[in-house]
Every structure is written in C-alpha cells, then in structure tokens.
Amino acid sequence: MEKIIFYILALVMIVFAIASVTSKKMLRSVIYLLFVLCGIAGIYFLIDYNFLAAIQLTVYAGGIIVLIIFSVVLVHHIEMELEVAKRSKQILVGLACLVGLGVFLTTIYAHPFNVAGKSVTTTTEDIGLGLLSYETGGFILPFELISVLLLASMIGAIIIAKGKKLTNKNDIK
Amino acid sequence: MDFTYVILIPLIPLAAFLLLGIFNQKIKPAVSGYIGVAGLSASAALSFYTAYQYFFVGGKVDGVYQTFVEKTTWMNFTDTLAIDMGILIDPISVMMLIVVSIVSLMVHIYSRGYMKGDDGYTRFFAFLGLFSFSMFGLVLATNLFQIYIFWELVGVSSYLLIGYYYTKTSAVAAAKKAFIVTRFADLGFLIGILIIGYYTGTYDFETLNNPEGSAILSWSSTSFMGLSFLTWALILIFMGGAGKSAMFPLHIWLPDAMEGPTPVSALIHAATMVVAGVYLVARLFPMYYFIEDGFALNIVAYVGGFSSLFAAIIAITQTDIKRVLAFSTMSQLGYMMMALGVSGYDGHEGVGYMASMFHLFTHAMFKALLFLGAGSVIHAVHSNYLKDMGGLRKYMPITNITFLIAALAIAGVFPLSGFWSKDEILVAAFEHNKLLYFVGVFVAGLTAFYMFRLYFGIFWGKDTQYKHVPHESPISMTLPLMLLAFISIVGGFIPFSELITADRAGFEAHLNIPLAIVATVVGLTGIGLAYVFYKKENDLADRFANAFGPFYKWASNKFYFDEIYMFVTKKIIFKRIAWPIAFFDKKYVDGTMEGIGNKTVVISEKIKGMQSGKVQDYAFGFIAGVVVLAMVFIYLWTN
Amino acid sequence: MIAGISIYEILTVTSILFFIGVYGFITRKNLISILMSIELILNASVINFVVINKYLYPDMLQGVFFSIFIIAVAAAETALAVSIIINLYRQIASVEVKDTEIMKY
C-alpha cells in the first residue's frame, strides 16, 4: 500500500516538476510547483515525520507559494507567455543534467547504506525539546540565530520592496 | 674672487621666460615687454659688473688671468667620471657675457617697437628670455656636457623663434631645416664628447685644457685610421660647432632661418648663437692646438677660410637684404674660424685667437646693428627685397647713418671697430698661412663690395615710389641702433690683446702698417666698385652679372647646395635606405606586433560572450564543471 | 521507513528533482521562475536530509532540525528575492534576465 502511494507521489512530483520548469505560463508554473511541494509533504507523511509535513505545507505551500503568486501578479499579466531558452541550449543543459544525474545515481547505488532497519516514531515534543535544548546536541543557538535572520530578512524585504520615494515625475522610469 | 652671483645672469632671463610663458594669456603685451627688458637689463648690469671685477679688479694673478669655477656635481657615472653643473669664469666667457647681454638687451628694447601689435608679443619675449638663458648657460658652462645641454637648448629656442610665425609654411620649413641640420651636426658633437669622456675620463674644461694635463699629453696613446682618437673627437666636436656656426657644408640652414622675425635674426643668427661654434673651438683651443700638432685646428682654419670665401661670393648675388646679411654672417664666422685655425698659443703667436675673439665681439655689435637696421628698413617698407627699396636716406636719417657706420665697420675702414679686428686676423693669417691670408684679403674686398651694394641699394640708388611713405622708426627701435653704432665705432679701441689671449698672459699688440694699408685699400676698392655700380641707377651691375653668366647664376642659387642636399636626402637616403628600412619595420616588425595584438583582440571579441552577465550562464558553467570534476574524482582518481 | 521502499529509490527521486531544478534554473528566462527552480533544488536536498536521518539514524533528529532550518532560511530568502524582484520591476519594468545583464563584459 505505502509502496504504491510512494510511487504515485514520486511520479506526481517528477511530472509536475518537469511541467513547472517547462511551462510557458507563469501562473501555471507556480501551481505545478505547488503540487510538487505537496507531494514532498506527502513523502514526509509517509516516513512518519508529521511535524515536518505540516511545516512543509504551511511554510511552503501556504507561505512561499502565495508570496510567489503575489509577485507574479504584481509584475506580470497572468496570461503572459514566457520566453524560453533556445532549443540548442535546452538540449545542452538537459544533457549536462542527465550526465550529472547519471553520476549521482551511480554513486548512490554504488554506496552501501547501512540502513538501521527500525522505526522510531518522533513526536513534536521531541523536536521542540531538541530545538530548545542547550545540552550537548541541542540546537538552541542556531534556533535563535534563525529567529534573528528571519527578523533581519523581514526588515530588509520591506525596505527593498518599498524602494525610493518617488518625489517627482522625472524619477519614474 | 667670489663669482657665485654670476649664476643670476642666466637665471633672471629664465625667470622672465617662465613668468611670461606660464602667464602668457594673462599678461598685457606692454607689461611683458617691460618684464623682458627689465630682466635683461639686470643680467646686462651683472655682466658688466662681472667683467669689471674680472678684468680690472681681481681676475689677474701674476699677470695671468685665472679661471674661476663654481660647480656642483650633478651626475656621477663612475668614481672618476662625473658631470658637474656650474659656472666658469675666464676671459672668453666674460667677454661672451658682455656680447650676449648687450645684444640681447638691445634686441629686447628693439623688439618692443618692432613687434608692436603682433599677436604673439608675449610669447616672443618669453622665447627671447629662454634663448638668453640658454646662451648665458652655454657661455658659462664648466664642462662639455653642460655646454652640450645648453647647446641644444639654444637650438630649441632658435627653432621656436625661427618658427615664430608658425602660420607661414616657409617659416615652419625653415625652423625644421635649421633644427634638423644643426641637430645632425650635434650628433658629431655628442660622439666627440663621448670619445673625449672615454679616453680622458673627464669632461671638465679646466682639466682638458691644461697644457700639462694628461688629456693633452697622452693624445698619441691611441690611434684610429691614422689619427689620434682625440683628434677625431675634436674634429667631430668641430662638426657640431660648424653646424651651429653655419660653416660649409652645414651652412644651408642659416639663410632660411631669416624667416624668423628680424630681431631674432639679429640676436640669434648674427650675434650670439651662431658664434657658439667659434666659442666652442676657442673654449677647447688648447686641445685643438696641442693635440696632434693642431691637425684638427688646420681643418678648422681651412673650413673657415673656404666658408668665408664661399659665403661672400653668394652674398654678392642675393637680393633679399636679410639673406645678404645672413651670408655675410656666415662669411665673417668663417673669418673667425680661420683666425682661430691659424693661431698659435704663446704670447704674440696667439694673435689669431685674440683676433678671433676680438672679431667675434666687434662683429656681434655691427652685425646686430646691420640686422636691426635692416629690420627698421623692412618695418618701413614692408618688403625684404632690394628691388622694392631705394632712396630711403631721405626718409630714415638715423637708420641711414647707423647702417652706414655698421657697413663701414664691417668693411674694415679706419678707425671703426671692424678695421682693428680684421687687421689682427689678417696679421695672424699672414704670419701662419699665406694662402689663407690671400683668401682673407679677397674676402675683405668682397665684404666691402656687397655691404655697400646693400647700403647704396637701400638708401641711395633709384628713387622708388612708395605706396606708404616710409618714416623713421620709433625711438625704441632707433635707440638700440644708436647705442650699437656707438659701440661699433669705439669697440676697436678696447685693448683685447691684453685681456683675452690663448695663454691668458696678454701681449702688446701693434698695428702692422703694411698689412693694414693693403686691407684698407682692398676694402676701399670694394666700396668704390659698389659706389660706381649702385650709387646711381645704372645697368653696369647687370652687365657685369651677364658677363659672369653661369657663374653668377650659380652663385645666386647658392651654388645649388640646397638642391644637392635635397637630392642626397630625398633621392638617395630616403628612397634607397630609409624607405626600405621603414617598409621592413612597418610591414614585418610592426606587422608581427600588431598581428599579435589584433589576434588577441579578435579572440577576446569572440570569447567575451562568455562573460554574458547572466547568472544562469555562469551557473551552467559551474554545474557542468562540478559534474566533470565529480566524474574525475569518482572514476579516474580511484587510486 | 516506508514499507517496501529502499533508500535508493527515494534518493533517486530526489536526485531527479534536483536536476529538474538545475535544468529550470539554467533554462528559464524569468527571475521568478528561477526562484522557483531554486525552491525545487532546496526541497530535493531537504528530503535527502530527512530520509537519511530516518533510514540510517532513526534515533536522532539532526536531519529534521536541519530541514527545519533550511525551510526557515528558504522562506527568508524567498521573501527577500521577491522584494528585490518587485523593486527591480519598478526600476526597469521587467523581470527578464536579459534586461538585467549590465554586469556583462
């Protein structure tokens, strides 16, 4: 059962990922990406990391995708056709990616992973304690750093997006 | 004696030059004229003071004039060979200070009138300042290298002043010609300097000129093609001097140099710069005299004698009054060279040396006077050509009288200055070389003839009808004329033989009555002939010219020397030598270099697209590179 | 642990996703699309973290923590990138890469 679900998810993710990077319609491309992200959340559910799956859905699917859609809507006509790269370039890049993929896969398959073989259920409590722990192996410092980073990026985003104050007409390009 | 203040003499004109040159546009013309005159007056006053101090107060020790040197080391080549900068005070340098400062001051004053209203008035005075600075520096140089530096500076200022009317093609060509010809001659000078530096280990005049010094005593230790190396060096140095002094065959620039403004001709191409060659030989006179028994000195004598005859013949045929004077200058310079060439060293034997310096002094005065007078005439008539003149004595009395005085002086009429100096030269030539004596006498006659041809042609002769009635020049122009005329009259009574001699000791000069009579008679004959030919308008002169036929034509075309030079340079050197070399250089040497450059440009043009500025292209390169590297490390680098 | 699915299969899927992201990053001509490709690449690597944690070291949580941090950083980065894009659009009225290549030669 889980096997079938995984294959379906994998298929969905790969297909929509390809669709997302090749679609000529901007908004559709974003929506395809949304499907991919949801598929990833599905994978997290499958391997029993419910908390991560929830984060994936809220932050990515809920936050980032919405942000991207907003920017698309702000700067594009929704139905605008996107330019695509030259065919020769597409093929060249595609080939390079295939070669890279080949290298990856052969390396992965050549590596004997030492799979533990047992399943431990992780609760949200464990994650929260781990993040806030300042014992050995605790993640309190990076956690605080991330909070500062988020604040900084928030301020930065506001200031950058606000731009210069346009005082007279000549400044508008 | 302390002569350090003499350094101010060149520095004041330099300051004037810098002031006028830098603030060229900001200074009113009238002010710039005063600045120039004031600067030169200061220099002249200092020069006179120096001369008084040197000759009459403290220059003499035991009846011998001493050499005073103030110098500082400028460049060190080896432990022994160094180049100094400084000032050297000895009889000839002091005399030259006087000559240069008087003539330069006169020309400055004169130019205030002559150049009035000219666009480049300030520039003109700036260049005059530069020239005066360089000339003073040349005169005061303590060693061969310093003299060479100022020698070139003088050449540059001469170039600038000849080309003063730079919109006139002929002036530009003349400036270039003067510069190139003298520069070519200076090449010999430079090589000579280097040879002397190599074989004697010094450039200092004091050391070189010491008759007991190693430079002179050891001349026979080296030889090259039958002559001592030092003789070759002296001949090469004389080549430089001949270039500056317009000696045959490097004279071709001097007539063309008359394209410059007339005061410039008077200052540079009559009185001061052109005598630099004579001064150079005089400066190195002990070397010339003692090395190889004066072999190089003989060359000086013959070149001088030939040039003087050659130029005098050409001068007769010229119709441009400035050119007549130019050839006359060349002829008189040849006289001085000849006098140096036939001179001995000790006591009365050294009369030629004394006579040469004497003539240099008197000639500077009356030739500057002649040029300034000619400038005054040209100023009034607006033409350089004899055919446009005649009967001017009625309009320009002062110019007429001063010009007459100068003409009489150069013709050697008693008791004007030219008589005394020319007489001494002829005495020297008579005592040492009869051939040159006869050349000298003949040239004296020719000189008298062409000078009075000029004088009668300008001030007497036909009564030309002028469009604008000529008028006497303003006081700023006539004042220098009168001053110079005064010096030309009394200059002969200066006891040169006691002041300036080769061995510095001085001797009692006395007039050689028979020789003086011969010279005077020849001179008067020349004047008389000119009187017959040109006093009244008649066709005698033309008939004579026709009688000489081809020779006359030959001479009036300056013996086709310009054409010969043109042929040699254009047809032979440029075409057969320079052009193929230039072709090779351009085609192959430059071609290779440019090819490399062009290929680089082409290749970069092709590959610059790689730097597209698109992050994605860089990312592609990055990822492709990572993949390749990963493959290399995984599959090839597996130990 | 997904029953019947080995780690190899999951890593294969993430590798494919990763290279699709790379392909998109290089071929797309639009800044927003490029941003989306970056998200794909990031997500592929996040999955790797999580899966390796789960399969190889089930007792620990480091992989999970890292993926949380990556998600947080990605969110921050996206917010900044979007603001830059908007600002750029106000300056040159375009978000095409070809209009922003003043850095070239």
Image (spheres, coloured by chain):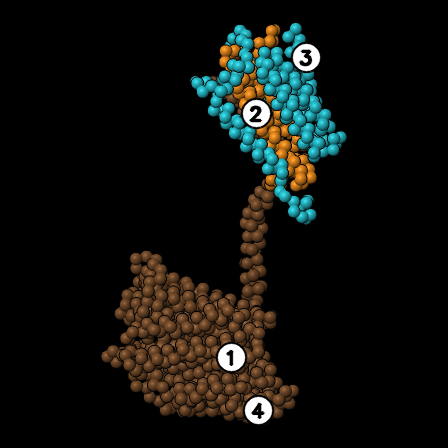
**Chain letter for the part of the structure drawn in orange:** C
The residue tagged 3 is A8
The subunit letter for the residue under badge 3 reads A
Closer to viewer: mark 4 or mark 2: 2
* Mark 4, residue position: B395
Indicate the quadrant containing the N terminus of chain B: top left, top right, bottom left or bottom right. Answer: bottom left
Give the colour in which the image draws chain A: cyan
In the image, B584: left or right of B352? right
Judge whether residue A35 can be spotted in this image. Answer: yes
Residue B323: quadrant of the picture: bottom right
Circle nearer the viewer, 3 or 1: 3
Chain hosting mark 4: B
**Spatial distance from mark 4 to mark 2, Cα to Cα?**
108 Å
Q: Give the colour of chain B.
A: brown
Eyeballing the image, is B612 above or below B122? above
Q: Which residue: 59% across, 88% down?
A: B470
Q: Name the residue under label 2.
A: C72
Q: Read off the chain for label 2.
A: C
Residue B109 locus on image (x, y percent): 48, 81
Give the CA distance from mark 3 to mark 1.
107 Å
- The answer to whether the residue labelled 2 contacts the one labelled 3, judged by CB atoms less than 8 Å apart, is no
Please tell me whether residue C1 is drawn above or below residue B201 in the rendered image. Answer: above
- Label 4 residue SS: loop
Identify the mark nearer the N-term, 4 or 1: 1
Q: Judge if badges 4 and 1 mark residues of a common chain.
A: yes
Q: Do the residues bearing badges 4 and 2 touch, measured as CB atoms within 8 Å?
A: no
Q: Say left or right for B432 vs B38.
A: left
- Provide the residue designation for mark 1: B111
Mark 1, secondary structure of its residue: helix
Q: Are marks 4 and 3 in contact (CB under 8 Å)?
A: no
- Residue B532 in picture, x, y percent from top left: 55, 93
